[in-house]
Image: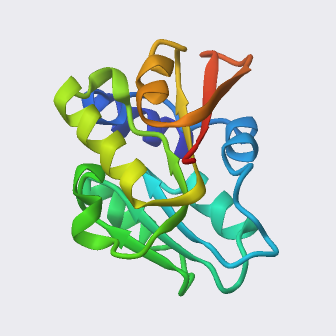
Amino acid sequence: MQKIKTAFEFTKKLGTTGALFETSRKVEVEICKYVLPDTPQLIVEYGAGHGNITKAILSKMNSNSKLVAFEVHSEFCEVLKNISDDRLQIVNDSAQFIDKYVHNEVNCIISSIPFSFIPNNILTEILQKSRDILSINGTISQVLYSAYHIKWYKKFFTNVSYKILFSIPIEFIYHSKKK
């Protein structure tokens, strides 16, 4: 029943969720590749939705790490508030404004925002600010439904790669580093 409710909510907001369903467990595992359980990190999540990736991050990250989760939909933020973890800070705003909320270098950014529906100027701003706030060797991982945006990542990051997860729909996980 929860999956049906989620699909309905995501459909109503397709332009800003970019999906009809929550991401798969395979995505959760792959996108959290650079969350280090043995190292304290500052981690940022873009597009927390109902929190399935948020929970995966929290379950893997170090007890001294902090997660700042951005979500533009206030209804989704209300769902996220049900996650009881002192390491989680929920921000009801766009990733475009990360510099308003995060003032320290970030070790890892995990994103599921729908770049296909975001205007190029805003996409550029998000990627620029992400690069600026990442620590040296910091990573950004993104789930998308095509390899189209790889060129955008190559403009801002090094060691850009992606992994294809064969599910319905096919999911691409981009991994990039700041050098």
Relative to 77, is 27 above or below? above
Q: Using the rendered image of the protein, determine whether residue 30 is visible from the camera's viewpoint.
A: yes
Marker count (numbered): 0
Q: Using the rendered image of the protein, determine whether residue 1 is visible from the camera's viewpoint.
A: no
Viewed as shown, does residue 143 lie left or right of 102? right
Residue in the foreground of this view, choosing between 138 and 147: 138
Q: Please provide percent x and percent y for residue 114.
A: 38, 31
Name the quadrant containing residue 74.
bottom left
Q: Which of the colour schemes (rainbow, by chain, secondary structure, one colour) is used? A: rainbow
Relative to 127, is 136 above or below? below
- Extreme residue toward the front, this view: 179
Residue in the foreground of this view, choosing between 3 and 103: 103
Q: Residue at x 24, y 49 (%)?
A: 96
Q: Please provide percent x and percent y for residue 32.
A: 69, 51
Viewed as shown, does residue 65 lie left or right of 96? right
Relative to 84, is 78 above or below? above
Q: Residue at x 42, y 49 (%)?
A: 131
Q: Residue at x 49, y 65 (%)?
A: 106
Viewed as shown, does residue 37 lie left or right of 7? right
Placement of the N terminus among the 4 image quadrants: top right
Viewed as shown, does residue 25 lie left or right of 101? right
Q: Residue at x 28, y 72 (%)?
A: 101
Name the quadrant containing residue 76.
bottom left
Residue in the foreground of this view, choosing between 14 and 156: 156
Q: Please provide percent x and percent y for residue 160.
A: 61, 30
Q: Please provide percent x and percent y for residue 41.
A: 62, 73
- Extreme residue toward the right, this view: 38
